Every structure is written in C-alpha cells, then in structure tokens.
Amino acid sequence: MDGVRLAILNKRFEGICRKMANTLFRTGRSGVLNTARDFSCCIVTADCDLLATAESLPIHVLSGPDLMAASMKEFHPALQRGDAFLHNSPYHGCSHPADHTILVPVIDDDGRHRFTVLAKAHQADCGNSIATTYHGSARDVYEEGALIFPAVQVQRGYETIEDIVRMCRMRIRVPDQWWGDFLAMLGAARVGEREVLALADEVGWETLDGFATEWFDYSERRMVEALKGLPAGSLTVASTHDPIPGAPEGVRVNVSIRVDPAEAQIEVDLRNNADSLPFGLNMSEACARTSAMVGIFNALPHTVPPNAGAFRRIDVKLRRGCVVGIPEHPTSCSVATTNVADHIANGVQRAIAELGDGHGMAEVGGVIPPSCGVISGSDPRSGAPFVNQVFLGFGAGAAAPETDAWIAIAHVGNAGLCYQDSIEVDEMVFPITVKGRHFITDSGGAGRQRGGAGAFVEFGPVDSCRLEVGYVSNGAVNPANGARGGGQGAVARQYRRNHNGELVALDACAQVAVAPGEAMVSISAGGGGYAAPYAREPERVAHDVREKWVSPEAARHIYRVALDSAGNVDEAETRRLRAATAADSGARVQTAAE
C-alpha cells in the first residue's frame, strides 16, 4: 500500500472516531460530558489491537480498549451484528468503574467479527456509596459501592436489554441523567459501527485488514526512529502521593526505566512497589500500563502514532496485587485514572529527562482539587437531585525541554483534552455561584522552561441549597518535581470559607458539606520547571512578570533577572546577578567533588 493511501485510510479511521466523539459531546446529558468532554472514542481490530483514537484522553485508551475487547470476546464468543456491551470492570480491562464503556463489535455480512468500536464516558454518578465517582477512602470495592459490569450485554439485535437499565436506574442517584449518557454512548458506538461498515463497502474488508497490518508496521518504524534518538541508560526515580486514608504515610511510587536506543526498546518496571492498599487509589491494569506509556509518549516526537504497532517497542512490567500493578478483586480502583497514576507517568517522563537534556519533561502537578470535584445536592429551584463533576479551574502543566508548560492540562493522563467549565453554564444548570477563578502568580515551577501555574477557585451554593463537594486532592505535601534543576510547583490547599469570612483548612480527601452563605476555596498545585531558572532568557522573564505569571521578586531572586521601574530588563544588573549565581554554583560543584 503506497504512503498516500495509507495516510488517507488512517484519516478515515480517525474521522470515524471524531464522528463518534462529536455524537457523544452533543448528546451527552451530564456536564462532565457535554461541558468538560471527559470521554474517549476509539477503534480496535478483531484481534484487539488499538488502531485509531483521534482526540481521546490518553489515560482512557493507550491500554484498556485492547483488554476490554478481549474480555468481550472471552465472555461472548458468538458475537452478532446488533450486539452491544457495557463494560466498566477494572478487573477486566477498564480504567476505573466511573468510566462506563460501550463496546460494539463490527460484524460483516458473513457474520465475521472485523473491528470493535468503543465509546468510553466518565459518569457523574456510578452507584458509589457516596455521591462521587472518586471514592479515595474506600477500603474495598464493597465500600466503594459502584455497579460493576464486566462486558455485560446491553443490546441484542439493536434492542436494549431493559434489565440492565432498570438495575442502573435503581442504583444511580441521577437516573435520567445516566440514561441520557447511556443513550449518547450507544449512539456514538452505533455511529462508529455504521461508518466502519460504510468504509468497508467502499474499499473492501481485505483493504482494511491490509491497512491495519501496514499501519502497525509503519507505526513501529516511527517508534524505532524515535527511540534511537533517546539517550541510553537506566534510572530509577521516585515520587510520593500525599498521605490519604488507607495510606497515612503517603504512597511512594518507584519507576525504573531502561532505554536501549541500539535495540529501539524501552522498558518501564513498576514491580518494586507496595502491595495493593485499603483505599480507592489502587491502579487497574489498564491505568498502570497506560500511565507508563503516557510518560513515554510525552518524551517522544508527536509523529509516532499511538497504536498497537508503536506499542511493540514498549515493555511495561507489572506485578499482580501491587498498588501500581494488576489488582485482584475486591481491591478498590475508584481513583485509578488520576492520583497515583500521575506519579507513574510523571516518573517516566522525569526519568527520561534526567538521562539527557533536551528529552523528557518535568512533573505535572497533583489533581482532583475541590475545583475539579464532584458536586451534589438537591436543587431548591426544582427539588430534583443533582450530581456532576465540575472542571472549574486547573493548571499544573509540566515544563518541557523547549517549551513552557501547557497551562490547562488538568492532569498528565488527560493531556489537556478536557475543557474547563463555562462559569455561566455551571451557574445556570446548578445551584452554585463561582466567586473567583484565576491563575496564581509564582505557582509554576521555575526553570529555563516554566511549569504551569496553579489555579484559585472559590465557589459555593446559592439560595437554600446545601452543597456537597467530593474530591481527592494531591500535592499539598509532595509538590510536582522539576527536571534537570527546574523548580518544584507550588503546593495545593483547600478551605471552607465560613459565614464570617474565616478560612478553615480541609482534609485532602473528603466529602465536604457547604452550607448556604459558605464557600469552597480551592488552590490547585503547580507543575514543575525544566532546567535551571537562571538559564531562562531575561526578556522572557520580563514578559512573565508583565503577564503576572512571575512576580518581580521571583524574577530577581529565582530567575536572577533585574527589572527597572518600567518593567524592562536591567541588562547590567542581570549580568551581575547571573555571574554571581554561576560562580556560586561552580563553587558548590567543586565542594561536592572534593
């Protein structure tokens, strides 16, 4: 197949994924879908190899669709056209129970299974024992409470099996909202099925099979080329999640990498970590494997297609019964997509950075502050219950070798693909008011390339509403690390503002009641910087000060850049400051050597 035809067919498959995503975005009922866009659509082959993802969240799709499709085939060996399956089991390939996934096998006219299309959507409520899909303190899946569907059939002959619908409507706090999202996922998957069948009618199944084979081989060659450009070496780095119920000392995550450019192989070993813990932050296999792959792809050129062909050159070693490995039932994986997962991805990309300048990235800041928590209550305007995750404000991107951080990344596995909420829309739909939202000066890690800032958000209930906010904040004790001499990001904090304006500090993992007249104050973490701050160009520092990313004091004392009263660079004083810093650094290196 010539290169032009290969590229065209790749874009045709990507276009199908985008049509699925557009369907889900425009028809999803909950704000976490139709405002924040916390969903993904992808296509895998009949052999369960990831083929196309388009604009999906990396934590949803790099690994997991392959495992879920394999579970579907294992549990339902006689697949038929018109079948659809609901899957959210973290023990059978899903990311975590909140990510409901519809799988639809694409069957040709002869009854042969050709591809599987998947639509995965984070739910506002999935039946947990408390009104949140992030139950960080759950000791096991029973305390977590989520309904678990290991590739359960929900349609046969294109007709919905109402037993499953009745079960969900009885256990989910916002059944109509869930039903709307369920239909949106089904619609997205059916659009994918329709479009793959149409493409096959146009070019033939043999052409599509040949494309998949050659596209995987091409992707592997691109991965080989990228890995040959990385520095060789082995390194172990560690970072620690903050203390949390079930892990009072925090969770240390050890990440060992080995890069072999000569053989074009990269290995990530996560086996030297603690056993599964009695909390909701344990990894599912999909998230453990995916998080390592996210860190790798963040360190590679974006010309490497993220599919099963490129994955041939990646070896992620996991251990069964490990907090960052393969969980065993009834281990809770409620928060598997974010908190501890980010320490895996951060560790991989930071380790690659430490192997050589110009590679890898710093660490992204901690996630799930109250501004990205799950709000719930009863709307006094209608008397109806509401549950939804909000994305009111986040930052915390990691600095890269040549660029400053992507500002609004949300977390490393999200890759900046979720949207921040419109304040006006949230205030129209929910009985809340947002009193302030802005980025925080000096909160991004300093460096030659600057880390992303943290965000300040203050919000609370209106009228007589009693609001609950569930969150699992990280980064108050262990901030995001910089790479190659870059600075750490600022720490996270969360408070309740009482009626008298007093700020009361709150736990990092909590389900907090906010009464009328009170407010939740969320300060999210900043991301790490890359390389020494005094290597940043002075004019860029002056620009940072004008834009309020950096204060004049930090410009002088951290970046060693002096500014005059008009905000312009004082070149003579800056040269003096940086010369003194370089001399001091040289003296420290000499002392250490002696």
Image (spheres, rainbow, N blue to C red):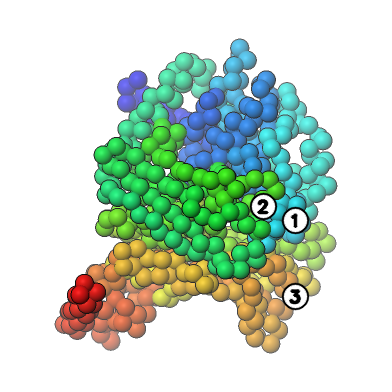
Indicate the secondary structure of the residue bearing disc 3: loop
Q: Nearer the viewer, mark 1 or mark 3?
A: 1
Could one spot residue 196 in this view of the protein? no
Indicate the secondary structure of the residue bearing disc 1: helix
Q: Residues within 10 Å of mark 2 (few under 14, many from 20)?
A: many
Tell me the distance, in whole angstroms, between the alpha carbons under discs 2 and 1. Answer: 9 Å
- Position of the C terminus by quadrant: bottom left
Check if mark 2's residue and mark 1's residue have beta carbons within 8 Å.
yes
Q: Which disc, if any, is residue 400? A: none
Query: Where is residue 346 drawn, in percent x and y?
Result: 44, 57
Q: Nearer the viewer, residue 280 or 567?
A: 280
In the rendered view, tell whether residue 451 sits above or below residue 330: below
Q: Which disc, if any, is residue 332? A: 2
Query: Where is residue 194 drawn, in percent x and y?
Result: 59, 26
Could one spot residue 217 in this view of the protein? yes
Query: Where is residue 62 drawn, in percent x and y?
Result: 49, 41
Which residue does the image show at 52% across and 72% down from the upper left? 477
Q: Nearer the viewer, mark 3 or mark 2?
A: 2
Q: Nearer the viewer, residue 320 or 197?
A: 320
The quadrant where residue 490 appears: bottom left
Q: Which residue is mark 1?
A: 143
Q: Which residue is mark 3?
A: 515
In the rendered view, tell whether residue 318 sits above or below residue 421: above
Which residue does the image show at 42% across and 23% down from the upper left? 213
Q: Nearer the viewer, residue 166 or 273?
A: 273
Q: Is residue 433 left or right of residue 127?
A: left
Q: Amino acid at mark 2?
A: Ser
Which residue does the image show at 54% across and 24% down from the upper left? 46
